[in-house]
Amino acid sequence: MPVFHVPLIAIIDDDEAVRLATESLVRSLGLGATVFESAEAFLGSAEREETVCVITDVQMPGMSGIDLQARLRTEGDMLPLIFITAFPEDRIRTQARAAGAVGFLAKPFAGEDMIRCIDDALQATGHARP
């Protein structure tokens, strides 16, 4: 009998309410979700190797979402990232997209918009929702 692997999405946001709401949305799609309050916590986690997509806030204490993206790219990691932010700036959006972001959503965002970004990220990595 084949083992079914559920794609794992990492959610990084310093706002607990946003982390929990996004985690609930991701799990409702039948996907795995793991949450982190900082980019540094994600980078040091065992789940990093299993993660197929990252949903991250742009502005956080310590390492920002943009800094996380730059670090991953420097390490040769092309993991798809979806950015969420309360302060959407065209300059940051352009920078994130140029480095391969699959989504850039302003808070509060519609669930349908996040689902579309997740589906795009999964497709880019050869995964699909169960």
Image (cartoon, rainbow, N blue to C red):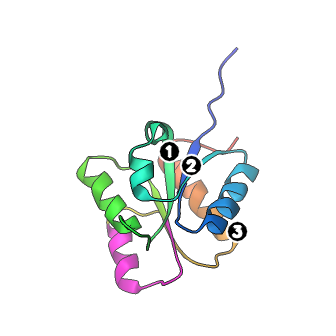
Whole-percent x, y for residue 117 in the image? 57, 62
Tell me whether the residue at label 1 lies in contact with that at label 2, contact meaning CB atoms closer than 8 angstroms.
Answer: yes
Q: Is residue 113 above or below residue 118?
A: below
Residue found at x 35% / y 59%: 68
Horizontal placement of 94 versus 8: left or right? left
What's the residue type where badge 1 is placed? Val
Kindly indicate the quadrant of the structure image that contains residue 3: top right
Amino acid type assigned to the residue bearing label 2 in the image: Ile
Whole-percent x, y for residue 64 in the image? 38, 68
Q: Which residue is mark 2?
A: 9
Tag 3 residue: 111
How many C-alpha atoms fall within 10 Å of the one at disc 3: few (<14), some, or many (≥20)? Answer: few
Seen from the viewer's position, the closer of residues 126 and 55 is 55
Is 95 magenta? The answer is yes
| Residue 128 versus residue 91 in the image, above or below | above
Chain part drawn in magenta: 83-98
| Earlier-in-chain disc, 3 versus 2 | 2
- Residue at 41% over, 70% down: 61
Q: Amino acid at mark 3?
A: Gly
Q: Which residue is mark 1?
A: 52
Q: In the displayed image of the protein, which residue is found farthest to the top? A: 1
Estimate the x, y position of residue 120 in percent, counting from the top left: 55, 57
